[in-house]
Image: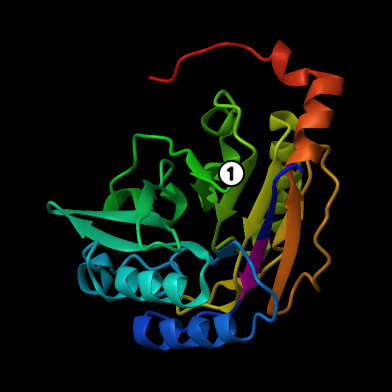
């Protein structure tokens, strides 16, 4: 029997720059998930919203939010992922954590900091791609603005799932919809995008459009795009393997090295 992975996307508003309120918010949403799930995906900077105030909002890796993620992952027997503001060795990072049910975790630092909002002036950029092995699936987690850079996402590792967490505003939501689908098609992988809704403290509006696409670019999630929702979809390894074997598009990809 081929592996399956159940993934729950949580599209939510966020309390502006209020980690305590946001942890409480998501704990309540976790409790509302009725079926067993293997992975819960939260938006980018899910404890604060997309803030440039890292000096007063950052946490250390062993801080309250990562400890909360560990406790919730253990409680619900599921993996949890999302990004938050981290301080390390005098630098700030927009860092995604992937916390496993056994309390271990791995992390990914956002490679492409969003210059339009001045993220590059506050946060240090990551330099390494991250591939996570979980329940028979290889997952590549990326963050928001990374979506615009297909070379960084290129499937040279034979990953199965490409995953984006985001605070992607309504003004450019067409790009979000288009690029998520494109990343799925060109990499022959499932592509998951989890965005937020509501207004942030800077007056920017977010309308979600969180979605899951299969390896051929068909949307397999069915939420109301612009409202809060919690939805679980099932990813099937057989869908990936059979389509790759039949079409063999990845065999013809270009070879290159990143510098």
Q: How is the image coloured?
A: rainbow
Q: How many marks?
A: 1
Residue for point 57% across, 23% down: 156
For residue 96, above or below residue 14 = above
On the image, the x and y values in percent for residue 142 come to 51, 46
Q: What residue sits 76% from the left and 31% below the top?
A: 241
Q: For the residue carrying disc 1, how many other residues have a C-alpha within 10 Å: few (<14), some (14-19), or many (20+)?
A: many
Left or right: 249 in relation to 83? right
Q: Position of residue 251 (x, y in %)?
A: 71, 13
Q: Quadrant for residue 38, please give it.
A: bottom right
Image quarter of the N terminus: top right
Residue 31, above or below 132 = below
Q: Secondary structure at mark 1?
A: helix
Tell me, yes or no, if residue 168 can be seen here. Answer: yes
Residue 40: % across, % down: 57, 66
- Residue 174, relative to residue 66: is it above or below? above
Give the magenta-colored segment's residue range: 7-11
Nearer-the-camera pick, 78 or 66: 78
Pointer 1 residue: 147
Q: Main secondary structure of the magenta part?
A: strand
């Amino acid at each position: 029997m081929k592996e399956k992975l159940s993934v729950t996307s949580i599209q939510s508003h966020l309390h502006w720059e209020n980690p305590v309120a946001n942890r409480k918010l998501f704990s309540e949403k976790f409790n509302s998930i009725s079926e067993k799930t293997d992975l819960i995906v939260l938006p980018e900077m899910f404890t604060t919203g997309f803030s440039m105030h890292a000096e007063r909002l950052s946490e250390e890796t062993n801080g309250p939010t990562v400890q909360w993620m560990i406790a919730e992952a253990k409680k619900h027997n599921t993996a949890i992922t999302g990004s938050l503001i981290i301080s390390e060795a005098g630098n700030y990072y927009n860092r995604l954590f992937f916390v496993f049910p056994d309390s271990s975790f791995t992390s990914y630092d956002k490679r492409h900091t969003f210059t339009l909002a001045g993220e590059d002036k506050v946060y240090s950029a990551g330099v390494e791609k991250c591939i996570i092995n979980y329940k028979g699936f290889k997952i590549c987690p990326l963050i928001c603005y990374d979506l615009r850079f297909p070379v960084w996402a290129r499937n040279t590792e034979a990953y199965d799932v490409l995953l984006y967490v985001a605070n992607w505003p309504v003004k450019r939501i067409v790009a979000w919809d288009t690029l998520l689908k494109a990343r799925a098609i060109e990499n022959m992988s499932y592509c998951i995008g989890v965005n937020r809704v509501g207004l942030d403290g800077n007056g920017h509006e977010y309308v979600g459009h969180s979605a899951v696409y299969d390896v051929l670019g068909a949307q397999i999630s069915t939420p109301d795009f612009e409202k809060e929702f919690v939805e679980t979809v099932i990813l099937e390894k057989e869908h990936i393997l059979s389509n790759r074997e039949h079409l063999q598009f990845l065999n013809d990809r270009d070879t290159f090295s990143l510098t």
